[in-house]
Image (tube, helix red, strand yellow):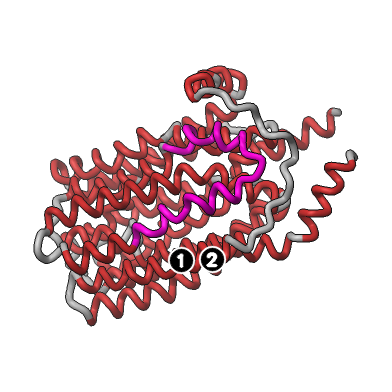
């Protein structure tokens, strides 16, 4: 073992507890903030209260997904040239957190007077803040990859997600009370204001992170065009990554029905507006239940299995929504949706770290794993909105079920678990 590697590992172990708390706290507060402005429940309900058509409601997950996914690969090359990633993240993450205050101001001062303008502002704000988030994610995940050892990462994300889910559970009770006791749209403004506070707390604990020294020298800077030109040859060389991206593409289409579960409950099953908070509660209970199992499962059996269970949960959520005769039965849909979210939280990014053949390529693999599916993830909920208008919600849920099942089959049959592959190579050497 080289002295550099020994010193680096000593640094990781010395600051492990601090970094687990700092990065875990950042993740937890961030996710609690998202619970106050949930893409699956609060934002669609806010849009519905403004009279938004289904295609606009479908645009909410489309825009947020595009922002979270598309920029990652375009910034990953620059990320690999940075000796330290934390200053880069701290400098720009303000711009993914401050816009939640913009949502609150829109709800308080614009929504009632000009609902159409408010809907437009919501979509622009969502695209801005998720776009910054997507651009910073490869750097944040590289910090996690260096600071948290591989056999601890599953439990790290699971415990952080459990804390986030418990906090989000409290947030869901708060949102239910707010929506029941305060007239819209001011009620939604209070929810978005609470989200802003959580984002500020998330930033404060992130500043406490102690980033380990890089395992290898930073990559040389290359023009973006040259960097992107490497991607086709990477996928030809790494067929496992290519098949993972195909499975992921089918997965994001299979998730397209989730943005309409709440709207279906409100418009078809006759749910009351305050029950949106109950839906968020069930979503978070599903996340807690999933995280209790998935952290342990991922560290011992790999992230591919966790993702497979999550996809099966999403297929089940769509099937329940397709057949549910009442709001009470539809609660199971939100629980299963939460199970899927837990699987993605624990393993969706972690598996990309392990798919990367070298630590220096982690930002590229994280970026590629997100940007490659961005066009599909953007189009799917928009098409779902059009499909809901033309053929009804049942058709949307049926199509989502079919794509989830195909994604599950591809993941199990065509994708090899990268941790097991690494173990085989190590044993052969």
Q: Quadrant of residue 186?
A: bottom left
Q: Quadrant of residue 217?
A: top right
Q: Which mark is residue 7?
A: none
Q: Which mark is residue 204?
A: 2
At 74% across and 36% down in the image, what residue appears?
216
Q: Nearer the viewer, residue 38 or 327?
A: 38
At 49% across and 32% down in the image, what residue appears?
245
Tag 1: Cα neighbours inside 10 Å, few (<14), some, or many (≥20)?
A: some
Residue 207 visible in the snapshot? yes
At 53% across and 60% down in the image, what residue appears?
27
In reply to whether residue 74 is colored magenta, the answer given is: yes
- Mark 2 vs 1: CB contact within 8 A: yes
In this rendering, position of residue 120 left or right of residue 251: left
Q: Quadrant of residue 330?
A: bottom left
Majority SS type along the magenta span: helix
Residue 389 % position (x, y): 14, 45
**Image: magenta residue range:** 71-100
- Residue placed farthest to the left in the image? 113
Q: Nearer the viewer, residue 59 or 131?
A: 131
Eyeballing the image, is 325 above or below 53? Answer: below
Q: Mark 1 — residue?
A: 200
Residue 316 % position (x, y): 40, 52
In this rendering, position of residue 343 left or right of residue 321: right
Residue 413 visible in the snapshot? no
**SS of the residue under disc 2:** helix
**Which image quadrant: the N terminus?**
top right
């Amino acid at each position: 073992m080289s002295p550099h590697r020994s010193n680096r590992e000593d640094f990781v172990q010395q600051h492990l507890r601090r970094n687990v708390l700092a990065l875990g706290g950042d993740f937890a507060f961030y996710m609690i903030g998202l619970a106050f402005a949930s893409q699956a429940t609060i934002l669609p309900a806010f849009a519905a209260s403004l009279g938004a058509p289904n295609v606009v409601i479908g645009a909410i997950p489309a825009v947020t997904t595009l922002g979270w996914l598309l920029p990652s690969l375009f910034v990953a090359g620059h990320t690999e040239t940075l000796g330290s990633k934390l200053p880069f993240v701290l400098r720009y993450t303000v711009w993914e957190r401050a816009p939640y205050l913009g949502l609150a101001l829109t709800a308080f001062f614009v929504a009632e007077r000009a609902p159409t303008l408010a809907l437009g502002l919501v979509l622009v704000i969502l695209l801005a803040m998720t776009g910054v988030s997507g651009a910073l994610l490869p750097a944040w995940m590289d910090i996690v990859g260096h600071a948290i050892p591989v056999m601890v990462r599953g439990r790290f994300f699971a415990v952080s997600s459990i804390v986030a889910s418990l906090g989000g559970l409290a947030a869901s009770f708060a949102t239910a009370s707010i929506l029941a006791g305060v007239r819209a749209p001011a009620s939604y403004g209070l929810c978005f204001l609470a989200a802003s506070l959580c984002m500020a707390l998330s930033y404060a604990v992130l500043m406490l992170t102690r980033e380990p020294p890089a395992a290898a020298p930073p990559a040389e800077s290359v023009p973006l065009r040259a960097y992107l030109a490497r991607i086709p040859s990477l996928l030809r060389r790494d067929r496992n990554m290519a098949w993972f991206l195909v499975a992921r593409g089918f997965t994001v289409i299979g998730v397209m029905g989730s943005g309409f579960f709440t709207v279906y409950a409100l418009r078809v099953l006759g749910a009351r507006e305050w029950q949106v908070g109950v839906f968020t509660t069930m979503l978070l209970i599903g996340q807690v239940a999933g995280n209790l199992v998935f952290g342990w499962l991922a560290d011992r059996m790999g992230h591919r299995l966790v993702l497979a269970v999550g996809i099966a949960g999403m297929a089940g959520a769509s099937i329940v929504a397709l057949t549910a005769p009442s709001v009470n039965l539809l609660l199971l849909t939100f629980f299963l949706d939460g199970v899927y979210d837990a699987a993605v939280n624990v393993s969706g990014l972690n598996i990309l770290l392990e798919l990367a053949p070298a630590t220096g390529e982690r930002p590229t693999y994280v970026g590629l794993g997100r940007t490659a599916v961005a066009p599909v993830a953007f189009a799917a909920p928009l098409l779902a909105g059009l499909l809901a208008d033309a053929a009804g919600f049942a058709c949307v849920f049926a199509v989502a079920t079919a794509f989830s099942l195909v994604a599950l089959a591809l993941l199990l049959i065509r994708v090899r678990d990268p941790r097991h592959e690494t173990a085989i190579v190590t044993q052969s050497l």
